[in-house]
Image: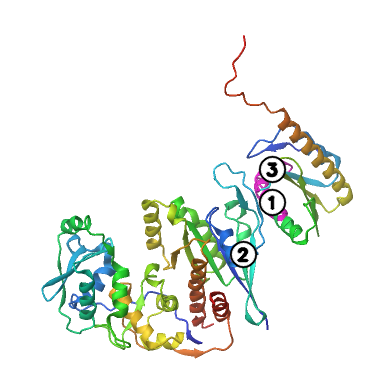
């Protein structure tokens, strides 16, 4: 899947997000779709599936990672990084995007996909997205101070 | 033989489900709360998977408590969490008004799971509700087709929490008394 | 624990009075059951005992005003209720008069007050006339929880009477609850209009069951928490 459009959803993602998702899909054989979601399960961007399933996948990803985080707290193993699902006809990768605020990335892959490869590229993608989101935040206009006087 | 029983708590976001499960589990429930990004709902946190707590029963038996995520986008979880339930508690936020709209999807999910599952309705935040909102809850209960028990609940009050469980247990007991012929 | 064989759930047909209910308690039960469907002139009523007014009722909005001295009037009402020929009667009341008085005297909640009166009106095991020891009742809906808050055992009776009509003996046996407790519940539920009389052919068939289910286990835990 190489020519997929990025479909902006509920909250338009930063324009810096789109190339990273497309790059991930282009770089790895077997990725059928990628969704970026908020921690509380809203779909923020999607590549691949255009059947309206992104919202549902975002909610499910949020639930999966929410439970995984709870398990991680129970076992005291620190902040969750990656969750891998390996099934009969495909694989699913879910990662935390360590930006402010934290976001989630879900990549759905077919059974031919090489897990190590998708894992490496997905981690690269997530790091790049986090950096882009942090850069966006840093570049955001600072609100004018209440008493500032314009100069002419 | 040791047995595990299950009670599920449903209702809209902000009705007090997580608080109720924490109260019953005596503060030891597992939570999956994250920051809420929905600008339409004024609540800092929201449950994305479930609250889980348990109570040790005599004889090595266990009562498992599951709080569900309230928003409709997590509705796929409700049938999963309802599987094997002995009873359900449905919370209605009295201060939000429109009780039917608040819980119609949750009650539908319950009905799809089982027409006979013992259910208790709890009206939360009644102290914040206006007279009209309280009356709307009363009117909704009167028009509801099944005569379900409905009582006020502040899930922070341990006595009220125990009372809700007592009512649910009376419903569960009744189901075993009036059982199927088949 | 005993079990019944299940019959399809339906609200049992209430006993239709051959003519309009005549006794005070019957009339009260009928009006409280019908509620908002009452003709406006029947929604407000005065309760009289041998010509003296004990209280005023607003049956549509669930309010009650007790005449002074209120404690004495309440006791007289309870005593009168337990007598077969009580001398109690309902008479029409001007709604405006009730509303005017309600601005000066805070009304009490009608059904909870009647419920309390019904619980204590008769001595142990005595049915409130016109109920008899063989009367079968069914609940239309769960009573206001303000009335149930003080006797948690009543939750079990409610759950059962919502599902099935039965008499005091059958209910007490099914739940292993003292007969007196069930009888006082029946009296209160009938007086406050939550329950109605049902014509039943036979009481439900009882079966014994074994083992300790969730309900019994919960009661043990609850007792431990409350200790």
Distance in Å between CA atoms under marks 3 and 1: 20 Å
| Residue located beneath label 3 in the image | A50
Q: Chain of mark 3?
A: A
Q: Residue at x 60, y 14 (%)?
A: A150
Please say whether residue A15 is visible from this viewpoint.
Answer: no
Q: Residue at x 24, y 69 (%)?
A: C31
Give the quadrant of the N terminus of chain B: bottom right
- B176 falls in the magenta region: no
| Residue located beneath label 1 in the image | A62
| Above or below, comparing residue B140 to residue C50 in the picture | above
Report the front residue among C34 and C176. C176
| Total numbered labels placed on residues in the image | 3
Outermost residue toward the top in this view: A152
Q: Which residues are magenta?
A: A40-65
Q: Quadrant of residue C118?
A: bottom left
Q: Quadrant of residue A137?
A: top right
| Residue located beneath label 2 in the image | B66
């Amino acid at each position: 899947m190489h020519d997929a459009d990025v479909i902006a959803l509920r909250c338009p993602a930063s324009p810096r997000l789109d190339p990273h998702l497309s790059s991930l899909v282009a770089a790895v054989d077997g990725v059928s779709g990628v969704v970026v979601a908020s921690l509380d399960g809203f779909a923020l961007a999607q590549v691949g599936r255009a059947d309206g399933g992104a919202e549902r996948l975002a909610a499910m990803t949020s639930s999966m990672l929410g439970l995984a985080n709870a398990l991680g707290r129970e076992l005291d193993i620190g902040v969750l990084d990656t969750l891998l699902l390996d099934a009969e006809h495909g694989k699913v990768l879910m990662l935390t995007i360590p930006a402010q605020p934290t976001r989630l990335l879900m990549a759905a892959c077919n059974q031919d996909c090489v897990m190590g490869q998708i894992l490496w590229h997905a981690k690269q993608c997530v790091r790049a997205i986090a950096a882009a989101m942090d850069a966006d935040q840093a570049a955001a206009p600072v609100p004018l101070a209440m008493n500032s006087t314009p100069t002419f | 033989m040791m047995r595990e029983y299950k009670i599920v708590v449903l209702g809209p976001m902000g009705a007090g489900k997580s608080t109720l499960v924490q109260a019953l589990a005596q503060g030891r429930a597992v939570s999956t709360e994250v920051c809420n990004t929905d600008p339409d709902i004024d609540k800092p946190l929201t449950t994305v998977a479930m609250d889980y707590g348990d109570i040790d029963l005599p004889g090595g038996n266990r009562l498992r408590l599951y709080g569900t995520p309230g928003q409709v986008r997590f509705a796929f979880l409700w049938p999963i969490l309802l599987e094997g339930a002995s009873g359900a508690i449905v919370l209605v936020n009295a201060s939000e008004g429109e009780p039917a709209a608040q819980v119609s999807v949750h009650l539908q999910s319950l009905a799809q799971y089982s027409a006979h599952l013992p259910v208790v309705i709890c009206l939360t935040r009644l102290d914040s509700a206006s007279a009209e909102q309280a009356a709307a809850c009363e009117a909704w209960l009167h028009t509801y087709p099944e005569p379900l028990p409905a009582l006020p609940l502040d899930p922070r009050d341990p006595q009220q929490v125990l009372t809700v469980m007592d009512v649910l247990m009376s419903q569960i007991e009744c189901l075993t008394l009036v059982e199927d012929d088949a | 624990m005993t079990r019944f064989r299940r019959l399809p759930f339906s609200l049992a047909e209430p006993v239709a009075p051959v003519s309009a209910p005549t006794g005070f308690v019957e009339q009260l039960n009928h009006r409280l059951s019908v509620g908002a469907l009452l003709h406006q002139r029947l929604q407000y009523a005065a309760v009289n005992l041998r010509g003296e007014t004990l209280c005023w009722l607003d049956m549509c909005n669930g309010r009650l005003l007790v005449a002074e001295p209120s404690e004495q009037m309440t006791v007289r009402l309870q005593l009168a209720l337990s007598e077969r020929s009580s001398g109690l009667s309902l008479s029409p009341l001007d709604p405006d008069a009730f509303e005017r008085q309600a601005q000066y005297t805070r009304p009490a909640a009608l059904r909870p007050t009647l419920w309390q009166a019904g619980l204590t009106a008769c001595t142990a095991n005595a049915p409130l006339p016109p109920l008899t020891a063989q009367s079968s009742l069914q609940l239309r809906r769960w009573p206001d929880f303000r009335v149930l808050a003080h006797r948690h055992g009543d939750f079990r009776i409610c759950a059962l009477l919502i599902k099935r009509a039965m008499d005091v003996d059958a209910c007490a046996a099914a739940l292993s609850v003292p007969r007196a407790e069930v009888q006082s519940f029946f009296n209160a539920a009938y007086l406050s209009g939550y329950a109605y009389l049902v014509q039943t052919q036979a009481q439900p068939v009882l079966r014994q069951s074994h083992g300790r289910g969730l309900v019994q286990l919960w009661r043990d835990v609850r007792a431990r928490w409350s200790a």
